[in-house]
Amino acid sequence: MNSIKYITLFILLLFISSLKAQDTLRTLSAQEVMEIVKRFHPVAKQADIFIEKAKTEVTIAKGMFDPVLQNEMAQKTFDGNDYYYYNRPELSIPTWFGVEVFAGLEYLSGNRTDPVETKGETSYFGISIPLAKNLFMDKRRAALQSAKIFREASSIEKKNMLNNLLLEAMTSYWNWVRQYQIYKILADAVSVNEKRVELVKIGYELGDRPAIDTTEALAQLQNFEMLKSQALLDFQNTALELSVYLWTADTKPYNLPVDIIPNDDLKFLNVTAIPKLDSLLETAMQNHPELVIYNYKLNVLGIEKKLKFQELLPKINLKYNQLGKGYDVLKTATIPLFENNFQYGLSLGIPLRLSQGRGDYRKAKLKITETQLQLDQKRLEVETKIKRYYNELFALKKQIALQELTYKNYQTLLRGEEIRYQAGESSLFLINARENKMLEALQKLQELKAKYYKTEIVLQWSAGILIR
């Protein structure tokens, strides 16, 4: 009767202390870790900077199409002679189609000016048109188109950076969860064996149990205490590894306090349904960041190919100026073309062998072929990874189901051995052996579950859908 009182009191004290411990603990879930990493990790912020840099490249490229206001002035006097005084402000406006429009004012005076120049105040309105080379593509348009593509690609590059970052962070998280579960199993085992030691001591004092049972119970307790100590060390180390990915809003590293534990309890987590393989492959082929980036690279190389093709064309430029007396540019622009007060020029040039043009154009085509081959190789690598991790995930799901049955069987064997022990038909040694097997099975089950969720993360990473 006295032994029953001791047992009841001891269990009640353990239950109360457990509740108090739970009240002081805080938790951290997988979703919370992902949000913290995406919002505050330096690599995530670097990805945002990468996008902003791509936007500035577009602004720089647009600068080549900015209107230009310039002024040219010259004057010469020598030995008392006024040779000339020349002043010409001009506004030029480059357009998207390679045509450049310009207008300006001109003043010329002096005793020794070029006879082909017009003295006094004049104005002009003109246009410069490439008729062959640079008509459909030139360096300015190529630079702007490429910058816009890189700006779009920067968001894909950000997804790729976050996809890789989250893989590392979530792998560390599930390692942390696994070690906590192992520590928790061993901590529970220590609590159970502490109670068992007390009960065996009470039984020995009452004459119900032999003295050797106290030694057997104490040895089992000491073994679990040693394992618990190592598990706690491993849990603390995995917490440090996870802390590498946890940062505050003001970009300061955050170390996990000892009173924070995983919110995800592997005991109560059931393996989720595995997505269809065909769906994963289709999604990856269309949206995987590494594959999409190759499409952008091919688009840029296509622009480069068009630009290099211009080197195969003759350089034919037409320049026309409509001239007028005085500084009234608007009136000058309304004079009929090629009728009066005009100036035009036509320039023509082409390399006879086109060696550089042919070489650059062939090199551009080879780059496209090379990149396409790289894309095909990358598609195969992505497909292989998805199939590999899919098979691993499917196998783990089966292993978890089998391990759960194994764990339940060891639980049944332990309960049966305890009943036999109470009836005097077994020994504490056999109970300890059954308990060790049960705890090994439980620990293996938790490790398989943690591996399952890690593999699920890797599968999502391989399909490029870890970051959405």
Image (cartoon, rainbow, N blue to C red):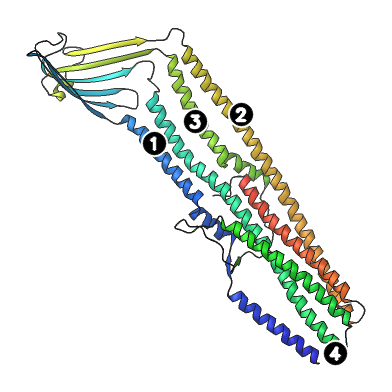
Separation of disc 2 and disc 4 at Cα? 82 Å
Residue 197 vertical position relative to residue 75 in the rendered view, above or below = below
| Residue lying at the far front of the rendered structure | 79
The CA span between labels 1 and 4 is: 88 Å
Residue extending farthest bottom: 1
Q: Which mark is residue 373?
A: 2
| Residue 268 visible (yes or no) | no
Q: Residue furthest left?
A: 80
Residue at (39%, 36%) from the top-left corner?
Answer: 58
Q: Secondary structure at mark 1?
A: helix
Label of residue 206 in the image:
4
Dot 4 falls on a residue whose secondary structure is loop
Q: Earlier in the sequence, mark 2 or mark 4?
A: 4
Single out the mark in the foreground, 3 or 4.
4
Is disc 4 surrounded by few (<14), some (14 to 19) or many (20+) residues within 10 Å? few
Q: Reading the chain from its start, which is encountered first: label 2 or label 3?
A: 3
Mark closer to the chain start, 1 or 4: 1
Disc 1 crowd rating (10 Å Cα; few below 14, some 14-19, many 20+) is some
Q: Residues within 10 Å of mark 2 (few under 14, many from 20)?
A: few
The answer to whether residue 240 is above or below residue 168 is below
**Element on which disc 3 rests:** helix
- Specify the amino acid type for callout 3: Asn
